[in-house]
Amino acid sequence: MPNVPKTPARQIRIGDEWYEFDAAAKAQGTERAALVRDFIAWYLRKPGAKLPTRPQAAGETPRDGGASQ
């Protein structure tokens, strides 16, 4: 039996930032889809949902606010 995803595929239009997003997600040990799902759950105020942590920017120290709120 072929691999059948649990959720249907959705399409959205995103510019070239999609590739930077992919690299940043991989650097954090995750994938774009997981981050998008986490953001949507947080945005919709789902119980227990948390805003995904952003990667540290070049030259930024953790005290500068690597996480978004």
Image (tube, rainbow, N blue to C red):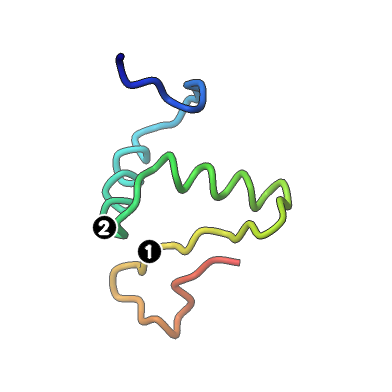
**Residue at 73% from the left image edge and 52% from the top image edge:** 45
Check disc 2 and give the amino acid type: Ala
Query: Which dot marks residue 55?
Result: 1
**Residue at 44% from the left image edge and 72% from the top image edge:** 66
Tell me if mark 1 has few (under 14), some (14-19) or many (20+) residues whose alpha carbon lies within 10 angstroms of its own: some
**Residue at 40% from the left image edge and 32% from the top image edge:** 15
Which image quadrant for residue 31? Answer: top left
Percent across and percent down for residue 10 are 51, 22
| Direction from residue 40 to residue 25 in the image, left or right | left
Farthest bottom residue? 63
Circle 2 residue = 27
Q: Secondary structure at mark 1?
A: loop
| Direction from residue 22 to residue 48 in the image, left or right | right
Percent across and percent down for residue 57 are 35, 67
Give the camera-side residue of 27 and 30. Answer: 30
Q: Are marks 2 and 1 in contact (CB under 8 Å)?
A: yes
Farthest top residue? 1
Check disc 1 and give the amino acid type: Pro
Percent across and percent down for residue 1 are 30, 14
Query: Which dot marks residue 17?
Result: none
Q: Secondary structure at mark 2?
A: helix
